[in-house]
Image: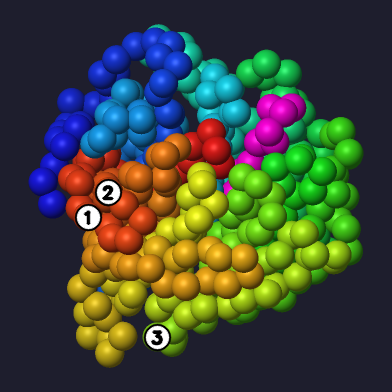
Amino acid sequence: MRLMGLTSLAAGFFVLSAGFSDANAQLAISANDGKSTLVEGNNAVLETPLPDSVTLLDLSVSPPKVLAEIAAPASVIGPPPSAAIAPDETFALVTSAAKLDPADPKKTVPDNRVSVIDLKAAPPAVIATLEAGAGAAGVSINAAGTLALVANRMEGTVSVFTIAGKTLTGAGKVPLGDAKSGPSTVIFAPDGKTAWVTRDGDNKISVLTVDGSKVEPLKRDLSAGIRPYQLDISLRGDVAAVGNVGAGTGDADTVSLIDLKANPPRIVETITVGQTPEGLKMSPDGKHIAVTVMNGSNKPKTSPFFNDNGLVVVLAVEGAKLTKVTEAKVGHWCQGAAWSKDSKTLVVQCMIEQELQVFAFDGKELKPAGAIKTKGGPAGIATAQR
């Protein structure tokens, strides 16, 4: 693909523009892991690691415009929603599930850091570093901008933070009952009264009740498929979709649809999408779901399940049914995806290529629309629409 935007970050972190007062802009962030790569299908530390970073984008223009690069800890460990933007786009949160081992820089160890990034500063910058739990992964901010949740993969908990302006304060942890449950994605429902947590360690999806800063398990777990990983909820709050990454043994894996209006909510549809649906994002208009599928691109080249490209698959949501609309080839070990507000531009993160691959979508087809280079592998992505 033709490269647009950042073609080189060799000079280090810099800002392309300062001050983001344009009311028509739509901010997005990509959290980039500078230390990780794949070696024979295994996550490994680069020979010469780069600093982790966050790329700030404007999705209101096509191709998306790069606004800034910010130094902040990030990690490919965990699902792509390891970043979140406040509803008013004033600040962002980025988690770091893993860091270089101080005792052996060729290895990584669990991390617990959450960076608070002021998006209105000139230049944008980290203004606070918080501690969540071991393996801090998925993060979500409620629609009121008053509460944040972080899924802690390595300890089976969800951290709770209250928000006042751009200041976050720890308000405890919610245990999910099993330290090996592997909480991955956590996301608020649009009304803020519940939150949903995928547990790829024990194949469950948990529901949390939210009352002010009090967050508790509802004791209602759903079963969608093997290793539910990224979950997203429509902006209307009527349905949710979850990608089930499976066992990684070359079999075709699935995406499930959850009817949130049913009492109690339940899985109503499951569709096959290919090997390892890593990332998943519902379009703002609620009509489509973009799924990033590994397609074997993360496996050793000697594997019978290896393919020399990943896929981005678009599904249509019609009531309680999912239907495949189209797909396009993407790079290798691709992670998350984000839509523009008009649901016409789709951005896909590809780790090995270290770029954001951009597509135009007309409701029927995906057409390549360029790519944006990042410093490090893009691993987490978010817009203010979650």
Front position in the image: 49 or 361? 361
Does the residue at mark 1 contact the one at mark 3 (Cβ under 8 Å)?
no
Front position in the image: 172 or 214? 214
Q: Residue 350: horizontal and vertical position, in percent?
A: 30, 54
Magenta segment: does it hold 207?
Answer: no
Number of other residues with Cα within 10 Å of mark 3, as a class: few under 14, some 14 to 19, many 20 or more: some
Residue 261's place in the image compared with 369, above or below, is: below
Q: Within the image, what quadrant is residue 172 found in?
A: top right
The residue at 40%/63% (across/down) is: 314
Q: Is residue 349 visible?
A: no
User: What kind of element bears circle 3?
Assistant: loop
Which residue in the structure is indicated by mark 3? 250
In the image, 103: left or right of 172? Answer: left
Q: Earlier in the sequence, mark 2 or mark 1?
A: 2
In the image, 180: left or right of 110? Answer: right
Which residue in the structure is indicated by mark 1? 367
Hey, what amino acid is under mark 3?
Gly
Mark 2, mark 3: which one is toward the viewer? 2
Q: Which mark is residue 177?
A: none
Number of other residues with Cα within 10 Å of mark 2, as a class: few under 14, some 14 to 19, many 20 or more: some
In the image, 278: left or right of 189? Answer: left
Number of other residues with Cα within 10 Å of mark 1, as a class: few under 14, some 14 to 19, many 20 or more: some
The residue at 74%/60% (across/down) is: 260
User: What kind of element bears circle 2?
Assistant: strand
Q: How far apart are marks 2 and 3 (CA)?
A: 30 Å
Q: Residue 241: horizontal and vertical position, in percent?
A: 59, 62
Hey, what amino acid is under mark 2?
Ala
Magenta segment: does it hold 139?
Answer: yes
Q: Give the range drawn in magenta.
A: 136-146
